Image (cartoon, rainbow, N blue to C red):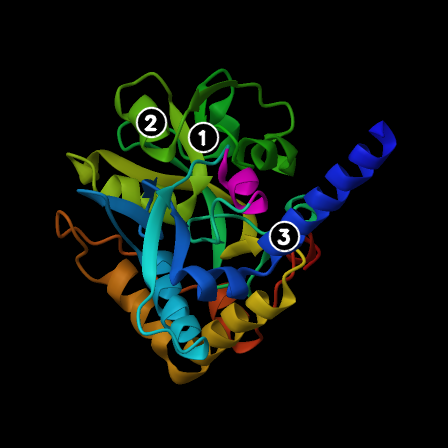
């Protein structure tokens, strides 16, 4: 009897996993979808208050889901917004709580074991932010300093692996999210904040005194940032990829880049001022879902 119950339970788990993996069927049956968003991921994904979210990846996902709604011939589609963190974003996608994560997630080989990624929409450069009057201009000058990063991210690991960081010893201090990490820098509890350039630029733009901060030093790493979805769901991945590829081809992504990175953005009307890089242009011209390790080989 116990053996039969165990088999039934395992079959049940298999059915749940299968159901979770068919995102299009889930959306069609409920006329609803849950989008994972970030509260302080620069201009990629951030809160504007009152439970509302905005940003480059948020708007891309809204347009993708509009295409999914048309594909499924739904009269309405209720988009529910779920704030996620660097720590919980992968499990919330994997367990079916979040259907599509539209934040600032690096596509890498380790994460691909648990989740899938759409084609790359942004190629990020990991940089260092410091106070403008700190005198810090390079990786070597982080020796003996306190370096902030966000729990659950890859940035400080990348910093430690950087060849120019050899022999550089620093203390890590962790923020629970990007806003918290920036506050560590702003308040003087950290001498530097290592993170994706867009996130650093976005937090600087929205700070009380943007001129008090600057990005310095070498580019620590180049990473593909992509929209995250559940693993082993080829039909949904195709829908998401097809929608994004259409936006790449018709110029929509270029317009969205201009809107979110080069023009004043809500809520304060500040400009991030981040120019479109050659790496991102190449990712749009040659759509792919390659992990960061493939970029590192270049």
Q: Is residue 242 left or right of residue 180?
A: right
Q: Residue 254's quadrant in the figure?
A: bottom left
Assign a secondary structure to mark 2: helix
Q: Is residue 257 left or right of residue 162?
A: left
For the residues bearing labels 3 and 1, Cβ distance under 8 angstroms: no
Residue 225 visible to the viewer: no
For the residues bearing labels 2 and 1, Cβ distance under 8 angstroms: yes
Q: Residue at x 28, y 67 (%)?
A: 258
Residue 48 is one of the magenta-drawn residues? no
Which residue in the structure is indicated by mark 2? 180
Q: Which labelled disc corresponds to residue 150?
A: 1
Q: Residue at x 39, y 31 (%)?
A: 177
> Would you place residue 3 above or below residue 123 in this image?
above
Which residue in the structure is indicated by mark 3? 292
Residue 46: x, y in percent? 30, 46
Q: Residues within 10 Å of mark 3 (few under 14, many from 20)?
A: some
Assign a secondary structure to mark 3: helix
Residue 274: x, y in percent? 33, 57
Q: Residue 30's quadrant in the figure?
A: bottom left
Residue 146: x, y in percent? 44, 18
């Amino acid at each position: 009897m116990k053996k039969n119950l165990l088999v039934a339970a395992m079959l049940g788990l298999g059915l749940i996993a299968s159901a979770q993996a068919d995102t299009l069927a889930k959306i069609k049956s409920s006329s609803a979808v849950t989008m994972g968003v970030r509260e302080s991921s620069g201009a990629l994904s951030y809160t504007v208050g009152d439970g509302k979210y905005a940003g480059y990846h948020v708007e891309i996902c809204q347009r993708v889901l509009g295409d999914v709604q048309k594909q499924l011939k739904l009269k309405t589609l209720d988009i529910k917004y779920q704030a996620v963190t660097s720590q919980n974003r992968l499990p919330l996608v994997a367990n079916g709580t979040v259907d599509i994560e539209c934040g600032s997630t690096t596509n890498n080989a380790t994460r691909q074991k648990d989740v899938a990624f759409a084609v790359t929409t942004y190629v990020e450069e990991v940089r260092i932010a410091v106070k403008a009057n700190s005198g810090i201009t390079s990786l070597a000058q982080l020796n003996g300093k306190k370096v902030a990063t966000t729990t659950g991210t890859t940035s400080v690991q990348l910093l430690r692996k950087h060849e120019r960081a050899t022999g550089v010893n620093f203390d890590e201090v962790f923020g629970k999210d990007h806003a918290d990490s920036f506050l560590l820098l702003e308040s003087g509890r950290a001498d530097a904040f290592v993170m994706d350039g867009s996130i650093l630029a976005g937090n600087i733009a929205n700070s009380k005194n943007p001129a008090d901060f600057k990005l310095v030093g070498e580019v620590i790493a180049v990473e593909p940032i992509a929209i995250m979805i559940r693993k082993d769901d080829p039909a949904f991945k195709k829908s998401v990829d097809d929608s994004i590829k259409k936006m790449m081809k018709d110029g929509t992504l270029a317009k969205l880049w201009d809107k979110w990175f080069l023009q004043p953005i809500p809520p304060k009307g500040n400009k991030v001022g981040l120019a479109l890089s050659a790496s991102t242009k190449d990712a749009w011209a040659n759509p792919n879902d390659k992990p960061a390790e493939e970029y590192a080989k270049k």
